[in-house]
Image: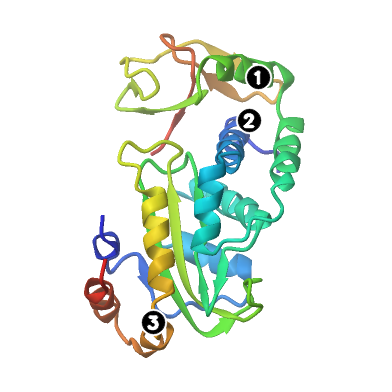
Amino acid sequence: MKESQLRLLMFLQDLLSLKKEMQDFQVVEQYEQMGFALDKKERIEESIREVTEQLDPVLYHRFLRIAEKYDRPMAPVKNGVCYGCFVSAPTGSKLVTEHQDVIEFCNHCGRILYRID
Amino acid sequence: MELKELFNNTNVNLNLKATDKDAVLLELINLLKLDEKAKDMLFKMLKKRENLGSTGIGKGFAIPHCRSLVVDKLNVAFGRHCEGLDFKSIDGKPANFFFLIVAPPIEISNYYLPVLGKVAQFCKIQDIGAKLKEIKEIPEFLKLLEDIPN
């Protein structure tokens, strides 16, 4: 089954956040002190590549542009509020991907919106 | 944040039935209140984290953990597998006790690493594995968390 583009983006952001965490020397040291072995960090890059290959190129480039501006290119929507910029009624612009997925962007901050329901 | 505040009757399972690593992750995820799509995404992310190095820290304990957009606050679960199963732990021995920890990428309270640290400390308490094996009901597990020094 084809993966939803929004879910792929969410997965990509989680992987990027894991990559960022693993680049922080102090965090890695903490992990090691707790007893976790982190011996295959290059696998994050492989996973990021796997996900980006499945993304619509237009959507991926838009994601990258937003990521240049914000640490978190994606934001949850709760009760009609974008939790990226905290401005209400984020009935923003939409992009229909080549997979026919509709991706919504916040009108105010431009972040990609998703709902946790 | 104390560990006892995070666990309750709904996020503890003392009789995991899984027979392999993937199945145990799924059983733990099922203890969280998430929809099917979110569970699926969380499973993938936990697997990616396990690919960096097993979260089986030895002596029968494993602490699968990750950050994920599918949650909006820190979520935890505990599972016990009486027979033990292969979790590719660093000591090569089977794992019996599993603490699942999932947090959103950014939390205002920033509990993720401190909670992970507390759980890791708990797992290193002498004879804690033997005590966890003896437990019969969830309230005994909660009492054990309450009794440990923080």
Callouts 2 and 3 on one subunit: no
Residue A7 quadrant: top right
Q: Are marks 2 and 1 in contact (CB under 8 Å)?
A: yes
Count of labels in the image: 3
x, y percent for residue B77:
39, 63
Q: Is residue B32 visible?
A: no
The residue depicted at 38 percent of the width and 39 percent of the height is A117
The residue depicted at 49 percent of the width and 64 percent of the height is B63
Residue nearer the viewer, B71 or B94: B94
Callouts 3 and 1 on one subunit: no
Q: Is residue A25 left or right of residue A76?
A: right
The chain letter for the residue carrying disc 3 is B
Where does the N terminus of chain A fall, quadrant-wise? top right
Residue, disc 2: A5
Q: Is residue B131 visible?
A: yes
Q: Tell me the mark number nearer the camera, choosing from 2 and 3.
A: 3
Residue nearer the viewer, A4 or B91: B91
The chain letter for the residue carrying disc 2 is A
x, y percent for residue A66:
56, 16
In 3D space, how far apart are the residues under numbered discs 2 and 3 (Cα atoms)? 45 Å
Amino acid type at mark 1: Leu
**10 Å neighbourhood of mark 3: few (<14), some, or many (≥20)?**
some
| SS category of the residue bearing label 1 | helix
Residue A85 quadrant: top left
Residue, disc 1: A59
The residue depicted at 61 percent of the width and 14 percent of the height is A65
In 3D space, how far apart are the residues under numbered discs 2 and 1 (Cα atoms)? 9 Å
The residue depicted at 48 percent of the width and 12 percent of the height is A110
Residue, disc 3: B128
In 3D space, how far apart are the residues under numbered discs 3 and 1 (Cα atoms)? 50 Å
